[in-house]
Image (spheres, rainbow, N blue to C red):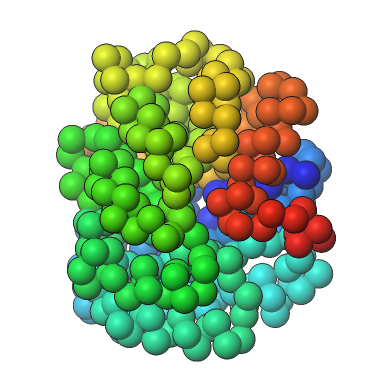
Amino acid sequence: MIIDCHNHIGADLMFYLHGDFPYAQHLVAMHDEGRALGVDRWIVFPFVTYAAMTVSKLRQGEVEFPGGIESVPYALENRRMLGEVHDLFPELAPRMLPFVMVDPMRETKAQAAELRKLRERYRFHGIKLQTTIIQAPIKHLLDQGKVFLELAAEWDLPFLIHSSIAESDLWAQCSDILDVAEANPHLRFLLAHSCRYDKPSLDRVNELPNTWFDNSAHCIHCEGVVKEMPFIAKKHRRFDSDYSNPARVIADLAAAYPTKFCWGSDSPFYSYAAEINGEVVRLICDYPTEVKALTACGSDVVNRIANQNTRAWLKLDDESLLA
């Protein structure tokens, strides 16, 4: 079994209005392409910006709250995503492991109330945060966002959290996420994007009993290393591998962190294109290339990082629970 642990479905209004890519993915397209490549299960969640933000600001690539067409962050997006999975395409629902999105800073009690309503109607398996784009420091999980820690404990759900090491990113630093995880040993956390290959962060993930990492958008992150781009850990802190060969990097990470590495594609964000400071930045890959880099590592590695480790983080020890 291959579980892809990192996928967005739905649409992102800021990415679309601002002219960035990607900005949408629907469930059926993701499923059909992935099944043809041998993927069996998908963790899915909404895109990042939400309809409670001011639309005119999103068009400028900025976030402002309140002022949108909704009042509660992610209320519409979570309901829409779960409805797509369970109501519109129930034949695909058994292969999906939906996560809800949350904002740890804004209207958190109202968000929690909406999640309780959704929990009465729909199945979901975890909580996802991408705090960089919405500019909400992840450490708010320890204060106004604490309600989400409480819900995760009540429902025994894991967290999947976008991570960064870029100095300009004030909202999703690996070290901050790991501080939250260390302060909550009764909960489970997964840091996305291989901690940007920051070895001290990966080592700390390995040391903490309640943390894992995924390698979502792996191939363009490897390209980022080759091009020495600023969103990747600097060389003196970087996990040592041959980043010109994404499959080699997967194999090396799997050997170094045998029980903590979970595989994910980050569909459709295995590609990214946008104009930044007057220059078009293009990091382009595709689903077949992501899967090829995984399967090149052999069946033992595939089973461990795309099945066993992911089920351990999800606390689905018995594979039959995914049948």
Left or right, 40 with reference to 123? right
Left or right, 270 with reference to 282? right
Q: Answer above or below: position of 47 versus 223.
A: below
Would residue 265 be visible to someone looking at this image? Answer: no
Q: Where is the N terminus found, in terms of image quarters? A: top right
Viewer-side residue, 256 vs 92: 256
Q: Kindly identify the residue that appears in the image at 24 percent across and 35 percent down.
A: 166
Would residue 113 be visible to someone looking at this image? Answer: yes
> How many numbered marks does the figure carry?
0
Q: Where is the C terminus found, in terms of image quarters? A: bottom right
Left or right, 1 with reference to 48? right
Q: Kindly identify the residue that appears in the image at 37 percent across and 74 percent down.
A: 150
Q: Kindly identify the residue that appears in the image at 74 percent across and 28 percent down.
A: 300
Q: Kindly identify the residue that appears in the image at 53 percent across and 45 percent down.
A: 266
- Point out residue 255 in the picture as x, y percentages from the top left corner: 57, 22
Q: Quadrant of residue 227?
A: top left
Q: Answer above or below: position of 237 versus 195.
A: above
- Point out residue 315 in the picture as x, y percentages from the top left corner: 61, 57
- Point out residue 151 in the picture as x, y percentages from the top left corner: 42, 75
Viewer-side residue, 154 vs 224: 154
Q: Answer above or below: position of 199 versus 278.
A: above
- Point out residue 225 in the picture as x, y percentages from the top left corner: 39, 19
Q: Quadrant of residue 281?
A: top left
Q: Answer above or below: position of 217 versus 186.
A: above
